[in-house]
Image: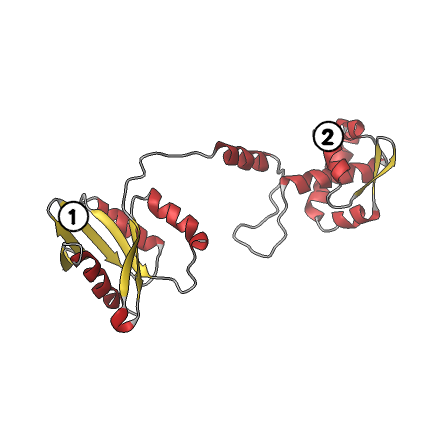
Amino acid sequence: MTEKELYPPVHDLFEKRGYKVNAEVKDCDMTAVKEDEFIIVELKRNLSVTLLAQGLKRQKTGADVYVAVPKPKQYSFNKFRSVFSVIKKLELGLIFVSLRGNHSFAEIVIEPKPYTSTYINRQKRKEIIEEIQGRTIDTNTGGVTGTKIITAYTEKCIHIACILDMYGAMSPKQIRDKGGADNTYNILYHNVYGWFEKVTKGVYTITDKGRKGLLDYPELEKYYTELLVNERN
């Protein structure tokens, strides 16, 4: 597939809407003009950051700018929801081209309308900030898949487990006094990982599963154990 193959369907799309369409005008793949309307379309085989950057450059002409790419074979709206949000934020338009021989056609997926308001999801922001603040040392690697991610919650469980492993059975208050999380009681009560066990009313201990669990996080286990030893000394 070539960019040249994308041109006829996109050309026909705008020509049928009454635009005067031209190709390769001052480095622009395609232009479409109708009265005061001025449109530039960039054609590419793949939707990429480079293409979006090229579209932004074309906006400096004052034109409404579209990027046109082949329609993905595994297309679904939910799968591309985030991509669409980026394109809208950039005030670009998006055209999908379906290549089917003599029956090829182009469809406008996103119109290049200005994103006039900026919505901030404050709850999501709060959750992200709290997650960052809840992590002490960064043992994760960015961009990986299929790998266990250490969350702030996991780290709190590790800290509590280290305290119980060193000092023995304790109450949530005693654990907090040793530096455990403010929500220690909830962590012990829900016992998501099965690391803790209630021995008497209001008193908890670490289980064998908990001790084995610590072995899965050697860096954090070492960090919190050394921290507890230093505090004790």
N-terminal-most mark, 1 or 2: 1
- Identify which amino acid the numbered label 2 is placed on: Gly
In this view, the residue in front, 226 or 197, is: 197
User: Are there few (<14), some (14-19), or many (20+) residues within 10 Å of tag 2?
Assistant: some
Q: Position of residue 203 (x, y in %)?
A: 85, 32
User: Are there few (<14), some (14-19), or many (20+) residues within 10 Å of tag 1?
Assistant: some
Q: Position of residue 177 (x, y in %)?
A: 76, 26
Disc 2, SS: loop
Q: Position of residue 116 (x, y in %)?
A: 31, 35
Residue that appears at 69% across and 38% down: 156
Residue that appears at 62% across and 35% down: 134
Q: Position of residue 17 (x, y in %)?
A: 17, 54
- Quadrant showing the C terminus: top right
- Please determine whether, in this image, residue 69 is positioned above or below residue 217: below
Residue that appears at 53% across and 50% down: 142
Q: Quadrant of residue 24?
A: bottom left
- Find disc 1 in the rendering and name its residue: 38
- Find disc 2 in the rendering and name its residue: 179
Which residue is the extreme one toward the bottom?
Answer: 101
Q: Quadrant of residue 119?
A: top left
Answer left or right for 115 relative to 120.
left
Would you say residue 162 is visible in this rendering? yes
Q: Are marks 1 and 2 in contact (CB under 8 Å)?
A: no
> What number of labels is visible?
2
Answer left or right for 90 relative to 164.
left
- Identify which amino acid the numbered label 1 is placed on: Phe
Would you say residue 233 is visible in this rendering? no
